[in-house]
Amino acid sequence: MANDAQLPGNDDGPDEETYYIGGSVILNYRKENGRTYHRLSDGSYHVPNDEQEQDRLDFAHHLWKLTYDGKLCNCPKLYGAKRVLDVGTGTGIWALAYADEHPGAFVLGVDLSPIQPEFVPPNCHFEVDDIEKEWIWLEAFDFIFSRSMNACFKSRTDFVIQAFKNLEPGGYLEMQDNGFPLLCTDGTMPEDSLIYKWSQLLVESTGLIGQPLDDAPKFKQMLEDAGFEDVHERKEIWPIGPWPEEGTKEHELGMWCQSITMESLEALSLALFTRVLGWSRARTLVFCAGAREELKQQNIHAYFDVYAVWGRKPAERGSA
């Protein structure tokens, strides 16, 4: 595990902020480039965990729900799940919503950072853990959910295999993520566009560290290769601006995606560009400011592909 001296770009120095749960230290938050990052499995996740980022995650939850017409998931476990695992729960907003809608289900949210609410429903629980390490839960789940986990895995395939092993027969895995880089079909996003370069640099930097940002189109094949059956893929788009026709769902999605993308520019870039690409904090901020100005102009008709993929673990032989 790299220490402070091994992670370049820490312009603000190796400041730490210690957090306690149950009287014991669980991690020292890293303060870097004016943002705060997790300390558990240090350096494995390159997005901040501070209040600004928590607000962004909660806004993104609304975008996801809008994408899927208010539904928390697409698989049959929209109803009837009993034991649910939310991988990379973040602020816990999805887990709390699912627990609220399904009082008969037990929902466990897991994340590297303890940024979830202290007071939660009795059927919802949060744990601080690294999902890339061996899973040691003794009881299987009947629904495992993963959303917005781009660039969080050294091997998404290994995660899918772990999920398969920890599902009960007939249980479901659903993964939701947007694709990278940005796409455009009408020629309004030239290759020298800063927002396009931003998305390409994210793909490049995450590729260099072996945590790919662009594997969402492979989700369906991953589930099938792991042994899931009845695998489905639902593909949508997120316009990064309100350029679609007014009054349409796409127009509303574009307004939300534009706002969230503006907040994402620095959040997704600061650690990756300084640690991996060797940029300074100042260069990164200037670049992000330029990309933000492009987004405000609304003349670039770019979009993200968005994927939801789900599949069922086969029932045991001889079962009904």
Image: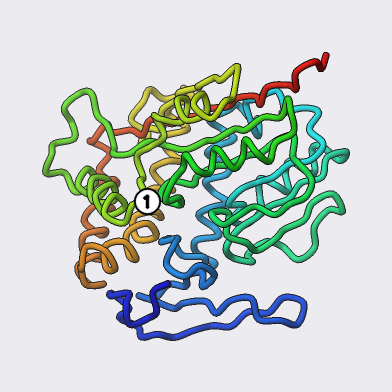
Q: Nearer the viewer, residue 46 or 98?
A: 46
Q: How dense is the environment of label 1, judged by Cα within 10 Å: few (below 14), some, or many (20 and up)?
A: many
Quarter containing the N terminus: bottom left
Q: Does 273 appear above or below 157?
A: below
As drawn, is 140 to the left or to the right of 290? Answer: right
Q: Quadrant of residue 188?
A: top left
What coloring was used for the rendering? rainbow
Mark 1 lies on residue: 211
Quarter containing the C terminus: top right
As drawn, is 155 to the left or to the right of 175? Answer: left
Q: Does 275 appear above or below 262?
A: below
Query: Can you give x and y, in whole percent of width and height, for residue 185 in the image?
Result: 23, 23
Q: Nearer the viewer, residue 269 or 163?
A: 163
Q: Nearer the viewer, residue 279 or 186?
A: 279
Q: Is residue 113 visible?
A: yes
Q: Does 286 appear above or below 155?
A: below
Query: Can you give x and y, in whole percent of width and height, for residue 6 in the image?
Result: 32, 77
Q: Is residue 241 visible?
A: no
Q: Residue at x 57, y 44 (%)?
A: 61
Q: Residue at x 68, y 41 (%)?
A: 166
Residue lying at the far front in this picture: please name it. Answer: 318
Identity, as a three-letter code, of the amino acid under mark 1: Gln
Q: Residue at x 47, y 25 (%)?
A: 220
Number of labels in the image equals: 1
Query: Can you give x and y, in whole percent of width and height, for residue 260 in the image?
Result: 43, 48
Q: Residue at x 47, y 73 (%)?
A: 36
SS state under label 1: loop
